[in-house]
Image: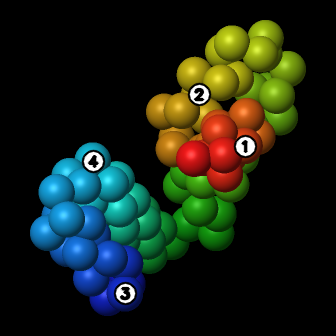
Amino acid sequence: MNKEEIRKALDCFEKDQFTDAKDILSKEIRVKKNSWLKTKLDLKEDLDEEEGLTKKQEKLPEPLKKAIKKKKGIKDDEEEEEEEEE
């Protein structure tokens, strides 16, 4: 696991930013779990695509794509703009 990310999660927790801490830890655990499984199963490709949608998912209607991105923790362009404004 990435020690810097774990420290960041602990800092968020100390600042009462519990959801941020949970998101960081969840991501780190998921990455480590997938890496372990990939090694044990001798897979050549990653188990989940963190960077975006699959080709089939790209063809879905916009509301469904937004829901999938939200579940994967991928921010929309609109969400990024809202965060920049804050």
Label 3 neighbour load within 10 Å: few <14, some 14-19, many 20+: few
Say which residue label 1 marks. Answer: 81
Q: Nearer the viewer, residue 75 or 27?
A: 75
Q: Which numbered mark, 1 or 2, is in the foreground of this view?
A: 1
- Residue 14 screen position, x and y as percent: 14, 69
Q: Residue at x 85, y 20 (%)?
A: 59
Q: Which mark is residue 4?
A: 3
Q: Earlier in the sequence, mark 1 or mark 3?
A: 3
Say which residue label 2 marks. Answer: 68
Label 2: element kind: helix
Contact check, label 1 and label 2, Cβ < 8 Å? no
Q: Earlier in the sequence, mark 4 or mark 1?
A: 4
Question: How many angstroms separate mark 4 from mark 1 (CA)?
Answer: 20 Å
Furthest-bottom residue in view? 3
Q: Which numbered mark, 4 or 1, is in the foreground of this view?
A: 1
Amino acid type, label 3: Glu
Label 3: element kind: helix
Q: Nearer the viewer, residue 81 or 10?
A: 81
Amino acid type, label 4: Thr
Question: How many angstroms separate mark 4 from mark 3 (CA)?
Answer: 18 Å
Q: Earlier in the sequence, mark 1 or mark 2?
A: 2
Label 4 neighbour load within 10 Å: few <14, some 14-19, many 20+: few
